[in-house]
Image: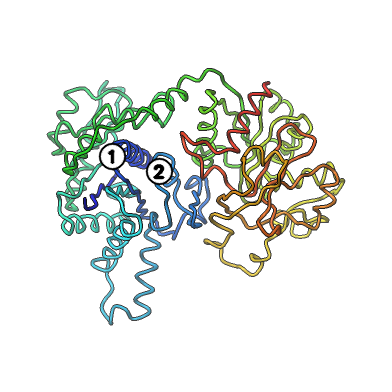
Amino acid sequence: MSTKFIFVTGGVVSSLGKGLAAASLGTLLECRGLKVGLQKLDPYLNVDPGTMNPFQHGEVYVLNDGAETDLDLGHYERFTHTVLSRSNSTSSGQVYETVLARERRGDYLGKTVQVIPHVTDEIKARIRKVVAEQPCDILISEIGGTTGDIEGLPFLEAIRQFVLEVGPQNVVIVHVTLVPYIRAAGELKTKPSQQSIAKLREIGLHPQVLICRTELPLGDDVRQKLSVFCNVPLDAVIEARDVDHSIYEMPLMLKREKLDETVCRLLQIQTKPADTTDWSRFVERVVKPKKRVKIAVVGKYIELQDAYKSIYESLTHAAASLDCGTDLLLVDAEELEEKDPAPVLRDVAGILVPGGFGDRGVEGKIRATQYAREQHVPFLGLCLGMQVASIEFARNVCGLAGANSTEFDPHPPYAIIDLLETQKEITGKGASMRLGTWPTKIQAGTLAHAVYQSSEITERHRHRYEFNQKYRQQMEDNGFVISGTSPDGTLVELIELRDHPWFLACQYHPEFQSKPNSPHPLFKGFVGACLAHGI
């Protein structure tokens, strides 16, 4: 079977959940036995999200090959079995960068370079590249932004051309739209969706499926109205109500709406019905856990839910595997800088300190880490979380007053964390960190070895600073344990404490490799320790 294509667009407002819709559809199609590929087409002019503030764009999701991508690619990898690469993420910045580089080389032979055909041709080439590199039965491509945004027009035009080139029988356009409830009128309104579809029609795209985000059930009259005025078959008007408990309910909800059945019929694909037994079992454990545990996440981007999206989901995966639910206490690290952390943290069963950049909130993270060490509370530190754990131990156990990272203090008395040698001559910010998958060698007899049940692992990285091995011996003499390093021993990857029941911190980002029915060992070990610790 030649590859079929699904394009997911969004209308009315942003943050409708196009990424989750695309990922959930991928789940259902995989449950039908199809091989699915996923791709994100982002209209912003940044080359990638790597230099964006998490408050603006949410977390940066890192792939195996080091690509810094949109958080939606995290949904794609968690909801399906696909392993993504930089080819699966395209931005306007990448497209224009490529086109202009060709123009500078003279590749266009003196022609006037224009959006059509040069930019649209590059977008289409990037769609085809995914299929060439990752053969699949169906490629789902999500277009970021909202229909009508000026920066998204080249992508929609490219799709219009692409439909003509591969044949309309091989393409389905899925439009995610908002059907708002107007409380004063006491009814759901379809006009915003009608206007959004009209915009797409102006461009030459005709959605065959409408996924309607709504707070309330779509009645038959609303479905009929959407069908007639949006020119979409009645059975292709799909209700996507806000889920009650977990985003992982969405594939099951869309299955009840027969979205996968509708898409397969439109693409003329004959498959078995979707077998969602394993997925349903996982959702049941998430929705109705037998026990609960309270965990504090002490971070600097707490205000924005999406900034630590993969961490929260990894905790959900781990807890579900233990038939447990998590109650997260989200603590702004800045609030702990000037106050005793005990009143805030005394009722939690575990403390997690995530990554981040810059010195804001770092002292609060250090105080939370000190509390976990002294009170023997299970602790998990990720990236910057490992660095602050090292600084805290150096200051308060080894007596190295003023110990710090050169990221926060260029000339500390004790540079426990220092810039990587390979980073010292780098001036550019974008894609210049230590990125992607790197191997780690784990020392036998350590907590890390017991958790991983392996002597060598691979994990995804995103950082510039490393533990300074100049202080290794002094810290180890005081109970600091370096349980994982790069294979050549030069870079510290995992640390733990000799006299603590469960204290682990890593330089990498394990949250990028956790899946619903395959929780990451570090998160599962941490949640298990929290359950054992209690409150």
Give the label on residue 176, or none: 1
**184 sits left or right of 512 in the view:** left
Q: Where's residue 341, x and y in %?
A: 73, 31
Indicate which label's residue lies in the foreground, 2 or 1. Answer: 2
Give the label on residue 81, or none: 2
List the single residue furthest toward the top: 290
Q: Where's residue 435, x and y in %?
A: 55, 57
**363 sits left or right of 272 in the view:** right
**134 sits left or right of 306 in the view:** left
Instruction: Tell which of 250 and 448 is nearer to you.
Output: 448
Q: Quadrant of the C terminus?
A: top right
Q: CA distance from mark 2 to mark 1?
A: 23 Å
Q: Amino acid at mark 1?
A: Val
Q: Where's residue 47, x and y in %?
A: 44, 60
Q: What residue appears at the point 14 percent right and 28 percent down from the top-left corner? A: 224
**454 sits left or right of 155 in the view:** right
Q: Helix or strand or loop: what does disc 1 sit on? A: strand
Q: Amino acid at mark 2?
A: His
When asked about the image quadrant of residue 235, the answer is: top left
Instruction: Tell which of 338 and 23 is nearer to you.
Output: 23
Q: Where's residue 267, x and y in %?
A: 18, 44
When asked about the image quadrant of residue 380, the answer is: top right
Give the label on residue 24, or none: none
The crowd level at tag 1 (other Cα within 10 Å; few <14, some 14-19, many 20+) is: many
